[in-house]
Structure formats: structure tokens, C-alpha cells
Image: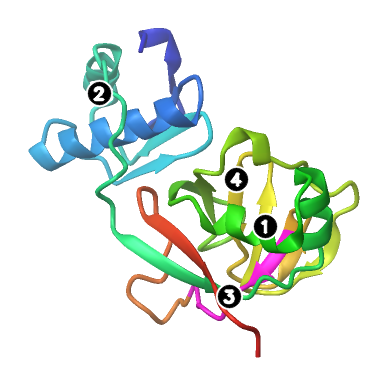
């Protein structure tokens, strides 16, 4: 981490740019530890993304910039986050296409997808949408060439290195593997989002109804 990677955003926020998701996870964990120790001063929010971490509501931008310039976070240990099981009916519109890309049957594709334990790397796109890492690189698939105008809530999907679950109906270009009845986002619930950075996720195959 170098000082050049830390950029001011307005008067009370900092954007830290890193190489990729692994570095984001390491820095996010380091920052949360320092926040718990009180070493960050007043920071309202820490928001990880694919290659950046945003610190918003910073009381002393200069002091935090100096601290970040010295950061040498170790690789993140994501094995101890809370575990969320996502029961999934694997009947998605793109399951056959994904299986063909992988060179396997649809049944084998389901076994491949339910095999790993995933981790929420960051959230975005819509409230409650988590970008989950953990699928081996040989199974990454491209987005659809033409996005759908509407994807149902609960759709379990793939795009590039990520798995995601659509928390609400929306347009989308990810490859649809199946669906879950689990409500990933509920504004009346605490917490409203079940997926947050660091949460571990295990997909389990269930029969459709």
C-alpha cells in the first residue's frame, strides 16, 4: 500500500485503490480491526468494492491518509465469517448453456456450483446484492450478450468470477442457474440485507415447487 493509492473524495472521504478482490478483502479486514481498536478516529462507513475501499465520514482526512500509507494488511482470513445457507432450485433459464460451457451435464453443473463455500467480497448494484467469490477460475462464465429486461427476485446467477442472488426484480445480464425463496433484502428486517462483506455462503440444491 502506498500513499499514491489513497485518493480524497470530497472533503470527508477517502478512496483506497488496490490490485483486486483479494487485496480489498485484506484491507477491509485490516480497517475493521483498526476501527474496533479506535485507531481510525471517526469514520462513519467503510465500503469495499471490486478494487477499492471507500472510507466515508472521515473526521481527520490527513491523519487517516498517513495511517493508510503505512498499511501492510496480511491476506484476509475469510473462514470465520457467519455462514448463510441458500436453498436453491436449479432450474434457471441458462443452466443448460452454463453446463455446455463447462462441458458437463446439468446435474454435474449443479454439483460444481454447490461444491464451494463462497464469501461475499462486496455489495452493490442494488440493495442487498452481494458479489460472491469462491467459484474456481475454470468455471467463470461471461455475462449474457443481451441482458434481460427483467430478472425475478431470488434468481441465482453467475457472471465472470462472481455468483450473485438478485434480491429484487431488476434488469440483468448474468447467467441464471436457479432460484431461492430466501429473502435476501427486507427493509423492515434487521439487518435488512442477509449478504454483507465477509459473510460465507453455501448453496444447497432443493426440489422445486
- Image color mode: rainbow
Name the residue tied to disc 4: 162
Locate the C terminus by quadrant.
Answer: bottom right
Magenta stretch in the rendered image: 176-185
Q: Mark 2 to mark 1: distance in Å?
A: 49 Å
Q: Residues within 10 Å of mark 4 (few under 14, many from 20)?
A: many
Name the residue tied to disc 3: 180
Q: Specify whether residue 179 is painted magenta.
A: yes
Work out whether residue 134 can be spotted.
Answer: yes
Q: Position of residue 143 (x, y in %)?
A: 78, 46
- Report helix, strand or loop for mark 3: loop
Name the residue tied to disc 2: 64
Residue 108 found in image quarter: bottom right
Q: Position of residue 150 (x, y in %)?
A: 80, 69
- Report helix, strand or loop for mark 1: helix
The first of marks 4 and 3 along the sequence is 4
Amino acid at each position: 500500500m502506498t500513499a499514491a493509492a489513497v485518493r480524497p473524495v470530497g472533503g470527508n472521504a477517502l478512496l483506497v485503490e488496490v490490485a483486486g478482490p483479494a487485496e480489498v478483502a485484506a484491507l477491509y479486514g485490516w480497517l475493521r480491526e483498526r476501527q474496533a481498536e479506535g485507531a481510525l478516529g471517526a469514520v462513519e462507513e467503510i465500503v469495499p468494492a471490486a478494487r477499492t475501499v471507500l472510507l466515508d465520514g472521515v473526521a481527520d482526512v490527513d491523519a487517516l491518509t498517513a495511517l493508510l500509507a503505512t498499511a501492510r494488511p496480511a491476506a484476509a482470513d475469510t473462514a470465520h465469517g457467519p455462514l448463510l445457507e441458500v436453498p436453491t432450485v436449479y432450474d434457471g433459464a441458462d443452466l443448460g448453456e452454463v453446463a455446455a460451457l463447462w462441458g458437463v451435464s446439468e446435474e454435474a453443473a449443479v454439483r460444481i456450483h454447490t461444491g464451494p463455500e463462497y464469501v461475499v467480497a462486496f455489495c452493490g448494484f442494488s440493495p442487498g446484492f452481494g458479489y460472491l467469490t469462491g467459484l474456481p477460475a475454470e468455471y467463470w462464465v461471461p455475462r449474457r450478450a443481451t441482458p434481460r429486461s427483467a430478472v425475478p427476485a431470488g434468481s441465482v446467477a453467475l457472471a465472470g468470477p462472481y455468483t450473485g442472488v438478485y434480491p429484487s426484480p431488476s434488469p440483468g445480464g448474468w447467467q441464471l442457474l436457479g432460484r431461492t425463496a430466501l429473502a435476501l433484502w427486507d427493509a423492515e428486517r434487521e439487518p435488512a440485507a442477509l449478504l454483507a462483506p465477509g459473510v460465507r455462503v453455501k448453496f444447497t440444491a432443493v426440489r422445486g415447487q
